[in-house]
Amino acid sequence: MTRAKKILTTIALLLTAAAASASPALADNSLPAPAPDTAVSVAPPANSAP
């Protein structure tokens, strides 16, 4: 194997290892935000006149 092929192979392995170690951190940020609480109560407020 020539020196250039060894260098390119080493760089490819380093980039693969870096991508594999960074992927869990990137996946944590892709979680969707929870839906806002839009529940509306149907009971009248306390002490309200009919």
Image (spheres, rainbow, N blue to C red):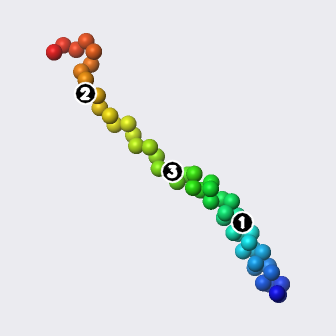
Residue pictured at 82% horizontal, 87% vertical: 1
Label located before the other in sequence (1 or 3): 1
Q: How far apart are marks 1 and 3 (CA)?
A: 24 Å
Label 2, secondary structure: give it. Answer: loop
Label located before the other in sequence (2 or 3): 3
Residue pictured at 59% horizontal, 56% vertical: 26
Examine the rendered structure and indicate whether residue 24 appears above or below residue 37.
below
Q: Mark 3 points at which residue?
A: 31
Label 3, secondary structure: give it. Answer: loop
Residue pictured at 62% horizontal, 56% vertical: 24
The answer to whether the residue labelled 2 contacts the one labelled 3, judged by CB atoms less than 8 Å apart, is: no
Examine the rendered structure and indicate whether residue 23 appears above or below residue 15.
above
Q: How far apart are marks 2 and 1 (CA)?
A: 56 Å
Q: Name the residue under label 1.
A: 17
Label located before the other in sequence (2 or 1): 1
Q: Residues within 10 Å of mark 2 (few under 14, many from 20)?
A: few
Q: In which quarter of the image is residue 2?
A: bottom right
On the rendered structure, is 38 left or right of 24?
A: left
On the rendered structure, is 26 left or right of 9?
A: left
Quarter holding the C terminus is top left
Q: What residue type is labelled 2?
A: Val
* Residue 22 image offset from top left, x and y in percent: 66, 59
Q: Mark 2 points at which residue?
A: 42
| Residue at the left extreme, as displayed | 50
Q: Quadrant of residue 25?
A: bottom right
* Residue 48 image offset from top left, x and y in percent: 22, 14
* Residue 18 image offset from top left, x and y in percent: 70, 64
Viewer-closest of 24 and 47: 24
Q: Which amino acid does label 3 sit on?
A: Leu
* Residue 44 image offset from top left, x and y in percent: 24, 21
Q: Quadrant of residue 14?
A: bottom right
